[in-house]
Image (cartoon, grey):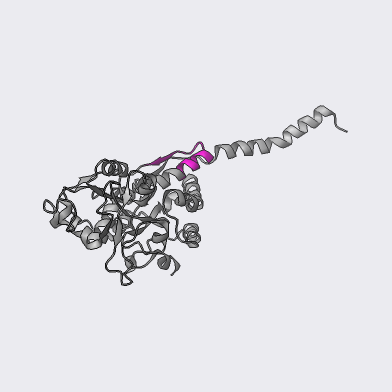
């Protein structure tokens, strides 16, 4: 029989591979910095995923910024970032820019958002607005002319409206103008813009005559200082009346016309880097749970479809075909 000392030596030698393995597990993936930019709306969710990934992979470096969806796509389509957060689908000119630069991408929906028109809690008159009223407030011809609440609806106060929102670099701006004004990037210009949604929140929270628009997550995080305006989509043939944004109304598609999906776009070539592949895998696994905390989760079953798109590296956008923007995300992904 071996002596006790030999047993100890043998045990230590046999455990050495396990110790090395555990050390590697603690380090996780490393590699070059993962560069992420784009939407301020999606920034909280992506930042949360990045923080959790960093805990599991301490040597990983993740740089998460929010320059806005438009600005982010401009960099992404030049190959300057690995992952693009987007609060709207990629557009034709951006697809063209990516193709010209030979940047291939995978489109991965990760959550829904109910773009939310917010007012100060002290505002008791504008708790519900119709889409035509919002259009009259935000269309280009309103610049310098529609400046008081009473000019929107008879009986509302003869007080000035103070407007806040994102600027033209934002996907939220793109989506809102198309949904409300009827033409993307067409908006009145005499309002206070800010690329940081938290600053819009602070401005509205500080003034009873303020109105702005932000992603639903900012309402959830600041519900004590903000109030959501119920939206009456008069084009709704069912006649539902004013609808408040909520996870339920967004997922059922009745919060119209301000329900939208949120995306991450991944540079396909960068998926050959182990750290990028590991992060995207992690994001897809974590997004259902974290979306419930920071955004609105996709409908049940869609995450499996999105996971398959990532695993199979399905390139391009489901929004490239004609009429796709009028379809639901569920239908586009399941075709």
- Please determine whether, in this image, residue 93 is positioned above or below residue 220: below
- Total residue callouts: 0
Q: 133 or 58, which is in the foreground?
A: 133
Image position, residue 265 (x, y; %): 39, 53
Q: Residue furthest left?
A: 145
Q: 281 or 114, which is in the foreground?
A: 114
Image position, residue 286 (x, y; %): 50, 50
Answer with left or right where residue 56 lies relative to residue 322. right
Quarter-wise, where is residue 193 in the image?
top left
The N terminus is located in which quarter?
top right
Image position, residue 245 (x, y; %): 36, 56
Q: Residue at x 42, y 61 (%)?
A: 251
The C terminus is located in which quarter?
bottom left
Residue 88 among magenta residues: no
Q: Residue furthest front?
A: 155
Q: Residue at x 24, y 42 (%)?
A: 207
In magenta, the rendered stretch is 49-64
Q: Residue furthest bottom?
A: 237
Answer with left or right where residue 214 lies relative to residue 249. left
Q: 133 or 282, which is in the foreground?
A: 133
Q: Residue at x 27, y 67 (%)?
A: 234
Q: Is residue 183 visible?
A: no
Q: Residue furthest top?
A: 5
Q: Is residue 325 visible?
A: yes
- Please determine whether, in this image, residue 72 is positioned above or below residue 300: above
Quarter-wise, where is residue 128 in the image?
bottom left
Image position, residue 113 (x, y; %): 37, 55
């Amino acid at each position: 029989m071996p002596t006790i000392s030999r047993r100890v030596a043998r045990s230590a030698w046999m455990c050495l591979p396990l110790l090395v393995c555990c050390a590697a597990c603690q380090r996780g993936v490393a590699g070059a910095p993962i560069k992420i930019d784009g939407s301020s709306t999606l920034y909280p969710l992506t930042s949360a995923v990045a923080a959790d990934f960093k805990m599991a992979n301490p040597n990983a470096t993740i740089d998460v910024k929010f320059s806005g969806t438009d600005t982010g796509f401009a960099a992404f389509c030049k190959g300057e970032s690995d992952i693009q957060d987007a609060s709207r689908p990629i557009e034709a000119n951006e697809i063209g820019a990516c193709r010209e630069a030979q940047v291939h991408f995978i489109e991965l929906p990760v959550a829904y958002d109910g773009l939310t028109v917010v007012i100060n809690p002290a505002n008791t008159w504008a708790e519900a607005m119709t889409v035509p009223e919002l259009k009259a407030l935000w269309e280009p011809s309103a610049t310098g002319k529609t400046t008081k609440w009473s000019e929107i609806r008879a009986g509302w106060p003869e007080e000035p409206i103070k407007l806040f929102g994102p600027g033209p670099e934002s996907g939220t701006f793109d989506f809102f103008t198309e949904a409300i004004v009827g033409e993307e990037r067409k908006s009145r210009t005499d309002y206070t813009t800010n690329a940081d949604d938290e600053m819009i929140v602070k401005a509205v929270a500080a003034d009873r005559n303020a109105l702005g628009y932000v992603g639903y997550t900012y309402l959830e995080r600041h519900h004590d200082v903000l109030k959501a305006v119920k939206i009456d989509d008069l084009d709704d043939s069912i006649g539902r009346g004013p609808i408040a944004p909520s996870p339920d109304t967004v997922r059922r598609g009745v919060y119209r016309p301000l329900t939208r999906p949120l995306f991450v776009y991944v540079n396909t070539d960068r998926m050959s880097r182990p750290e990028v592949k590991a992060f995207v895998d992690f994001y897809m696994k974590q997004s259902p749970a974290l979306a419930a905390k920071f955004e609105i989760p996709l409908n049940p079953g869609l995450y499996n479809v999105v996971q398959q798109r990532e695993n199979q590296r399905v390139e391009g956008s489901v929004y490239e075909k004609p009429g796709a923007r009028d379809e639901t995300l569920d239908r586009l992904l399941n075709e």
